[in-house]
Amino acid sequence: MANKRYPGVYLDKDGTYYIQPRVKDIYGNVKRPTIRGFKTQKEAFEAKEEKMRKLEISSNKYITYKDAFLENLKYKLDKGKIGESTYNTVLRRNELHILPKIGNINIFDITVQLYRDLQLELKNEGLNIRTINGLHSDVVSTLKYSTLFHNLEYNVAIMVGPVYADRDNINGFISIEDMKKINKEDSLDPAEWESITKYYEKLINEEKNDEEKIILIKEMLVIICEYVLMMRVGEVQGLTYDYIYFEKKFIFLNKSYSKDAKKITPLKNRETRFIYPPDSVLALFKICYEADNKYNEFKENDLVFGYTGHFSRTNILRRLKKIMKELDIDKNLSNHKLRHSGISYQLYEGQDPTAIATFAGHNKEMTMNQYNQVLGVANKELVDSLSKLYVPKIK
């Protein structure tokens, strides 16, 4: 319910606030994007007002990339964010490599494909990776400025990401074609997944010590969260029981362990979301929850797994690889590849890409694709598909 003092501000399930400003895209379509994670009503209200103000003053539907670039560069110079020397350096390198290629293009016409092709063109011209990524930072900055002051909806440069020496410059999922480029040689198929979880099932059911049994269940749950629920490893490590809604059958994700910051932080870009685990996965969480309450004096806001010791990403992965070696599964897995294996499998199963992207937290990137299926139906079909993946039955 919106507050009378701060209209348009709503209380979220986790005690924070969110807004849904009414905006129009460049084609005149009315949208109500949800922006979450504000600590106070005042902060949320001010953000909504600022968003509306920028939309009102930004009626220009055509601005060349060169104009946006120069405007951004001057803005940074005037604000003291860069000095004259940096200004001249950035201007020179862009006049040489970027502006001749896309300078006259409308910023609203710069697509993921166009920007990806531009980066690969620079790479093929023989520019070193450091130079290309310096130019990439300039493009990111220009398009970010345009999202703030020219109503540009997507920063495609962030979506594509930097260039790498040993592979194409794909940093995230941009389209279904990109998703399907995941190297199948490093991706677990459902049969291999079932053999791994059955191995855990045998270990757990044979374990006589209750505490050791719970540790094994949690260890298995970490990889289930990554493969079946398509969660990032940081999201798994930042998970608490108070965000697992057993009766309503969903998990609310709004925080993650940051390896760089060494602490639990809000999700990047406030990409909070609900995921709907199969009943078999919720049953395993329930076992752990009841055991932790009984034996470990757990508080609901304590971490289910944690990010150090036994459940650190390194230790989990080391034990998983040991099991894979015993099962003769020759895959070069990482936490990242384990999550993407689950995503890739659902795509090959024909599940709706928008539903997968929303479930996995890639909704911003996937908005670039114009999929028209009803998301509610697609979500149900996706959850039904997840339920078909093998999850052990614990005695």
Image (cartoon, rainbow, N blue to C red):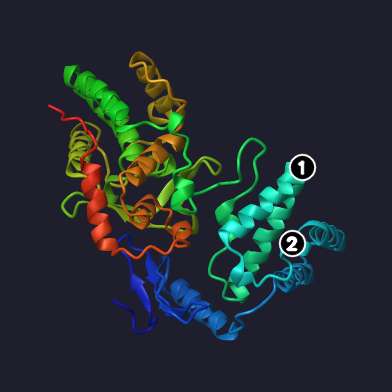
* Residue 189: quadrant of the picture: top left
The mark that comes first in sequence, 1 or 2, is 2
Indicate left or right for 16 with 67 as reference. left
Say which element carries label 1: loop
* Front position in the image: 242 or 152: 152
Vertical placement of residue 253 versus 9, above or below: above
- State the image coordinates of residue 263 (x, y, percent, origin top left): 48, 44
Residue 266: image location, x then y, percent? 45, 54
For the residues marked 1 and 2, what is the alpha-carbon distance in whole angstroms?
Answer: 18 Å
Residue at position x 34%, y 33% in the image: 223
Residue 276 seen: no
Residue 24 or residue 121, whichever sits in front = 121
Q: Amino acid at mark 1?
A: Asn
Q: Which residue is mark 2?
A: 101
Amino acid type at circle 2 is: Lys
Q: Is 377 on the left-hand or right-hand side of 325?
A: left
- At horizontal 75% and vertical 63% (from top left) the residue drawn is 81
Q: Estimate the x, y position of residue 312 in percent, counting from the top left.
A: 43, 31
The C terminus: image quadrant: top left
Q: Is residue 314 above or below residue 249?
A: above
Numbered circle sitting on residue 137: none
The residue that mark 1 highlights is 128
Picture residue at 58% right of the left edge, 52% below the top:
160
Name of the residue lying farthest toward the left: 395
Image quarter in which the N terminus is found: bottom left
